[in-house]
Amino acid sequence: MFAFSSGWFSGERTGQALLPLLSFLFPSADSATLEAIHQALRKGAHVGEYAVLSGLLYRALRTGEAWSARTAGAAILLAALYAAGDELHQVFVPERTAAVSDCLIDVGGAAAAQVVVAAAALSRRAAP
């Protein structure tokens, strides 16, 4: 995940790859719309990668078969700490900017994964 914080995945670089593709897929869209889609994809990637991290952390930390709020909270906390470290790292990368909003988006993705984990556990418990 740390590689995604490098200059290789800056908005400018991902734009060089994604904006022509988006322009091809949405030929009638103006440049502002294409930029908005690009930004949404970038923020969606934040949510997705931290959801995966949180799910993996839950799996690594769990001690039994039953769902645990404590384990879910620990997974979210560890993902949040990683997100904060990731944003701190971006302060030192010239092509990147650190943003508290990105950290909050990351934590949102981590929390969303735990909602899915809890819902899956509850549905397994309710199944006959």
Image (cartoon, rainbow, N blue to C red):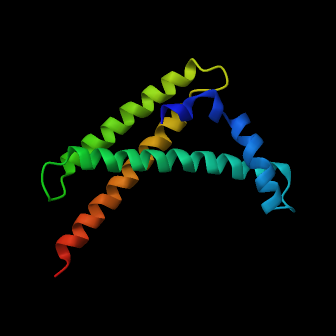
The quarter in which the C terminus is drawn is bottom left
Q: Position of residue 112 (x, y in %)?
A: 40, 54
In this rendering, the answer to whether 93 lies above or below 52 is above
Q: Position of residue 55 (x, y in %)?
A: 34, 50
Q: Is residue 9 left or right of residue 103?
A: right
Location of residue 123 by image quarter? bottom left
In this rendering, the answer to whether 8 lies above or below 74 is above
Residue lying at 49% horizontally and 43% vertically, measured from the top left: 105
Labels in figure, total: 0
Q: Position of residue 89 (x, y in %)?
A: 51, 22
Q: Is residue 115 left or right of residue 30?
A: left
Location of residue 66 by image quarter? bottom left
Location of residue 11 by image quarter? top right
In this rendering, the answer to whether 55 lies above or below 85 is below
The foreground one among 104 and 120 is 120
Q: Position of residue 40 (x, y in %)?
A: 64, 50
Q: Residue furthest top?
A: 92
Residue lying at 37% horizontally and 49% vertically, measured from the top left: 111
Q: Residue furthest bottom?
A: 128
Residue lying at 32% horizontally and 48% vertically, measured from the top left: 56
The foreground one among 10 and 99 is 10
Residue lying at 74% horizontally and 42% vertically, measured from the top left: 15
Q: Is residue 125 left or right of residue 13?
A: left
